[in-house]
Amino acid sequence: MRVDREEARDRILRLIEDSDNPWLKAAFYGDPKVSQVLDRLFEEWEKSGRKGIPIDYATDDELVVLERAAVKYASMSTAELQMIAYSYMSGGGEERVSLSRFIRRILGLE
């Protein structure tokens, strides 16, 4: 898949890194797909003597994964991002998040 690398990179950085919303960052970085990509990027970045920034080492496919996740999370409300982030922190996944379960967990009923 061909992507405009500079545009995708700038969009990811603008949506995630430039955001003041810690829940957006927690949900994005807690996403297993994002985490998997970033693990590889940091490894490549380290091997290259930390030149540039880790996202510079992303393949086109990895940029697509990161950009889609950035757009998805940036379009969510803070409440949605909190539920997702808490779910990732508790070992669940986004697909397992439900409002009622989240509320039960917060109230100590689960």
Image: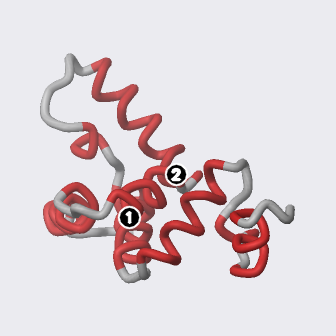
Please name whichever residue, 52 or 89, is drawn nearer the observer in this view of the structure: 89
Residue for point 54% across, 59% down: 85
Marks 1 and 2 in Cβ contact (< 8 Å) = no
Please give the label number shown on residue 76. Answer: none
Q: Quadrant of the N terminus?
A: bottom left
Please give the residue where the numbered disc 2 appears in the rendered image: 30
Residue for point 79% across, 60% down: 108
Please name whichever residue, 85 or 32, is drawn nearer the observer in this view of the structure: 85
Where 18 sits versus 48, above or below?
below
Where is residue 84? Give x, y as percent.
Answer: 58, 66
Please name whichever residue, 44 or 75, is drawn nearer the observer in this view of the structure: 75
Q: Quadrant of the C terminus?
A: bottom right
Q: Dividing the picture into quarters, in which one does residue 45 lie?
A: top left
Please name whichever residue, 74 or 53, is drawn nearer the observer in this view of the structure: 74
Question: What element does badge 2 sit on?
Answer: helix
Q: Dividing the picture into quarters, in which one does residue 47 lie?
A: top left
Q: Amino acid at mark 2?
A: Gly
Q: Amino acid at mark 1?
A: Leu
Local crowd size for mark 2, using a 10 Å CA cut-off: few (<14), some (14–19), many (≥20): many
Mark before the other along the chain sequence, 1 or 2: 1
Please give the residue where the numbered disc 1 appears in the rendered image: 24
Coloring basis for residues:
secondary structure
Distance from the alpha carbon under mark 1 to that under mark 2: 10 Å
Question: What element does badge 1 sit on?
Answer: helix
Residue for point 16% across, 68% down: 7
Where 64 sits versus 17, above or below?
below
Q: Dividing the picture into quarters, in which one does residue 87 lie?
A: bottom right
Local crowd size for mark 1, using a 10 Å CA cut-off: few (<14), some (14–19), many (≥20): many
Where is residue 25? Give x, y as percent.
Answer: 37, 56
Where is residue 28? Give x, y as percent.
Answer: 44, 59
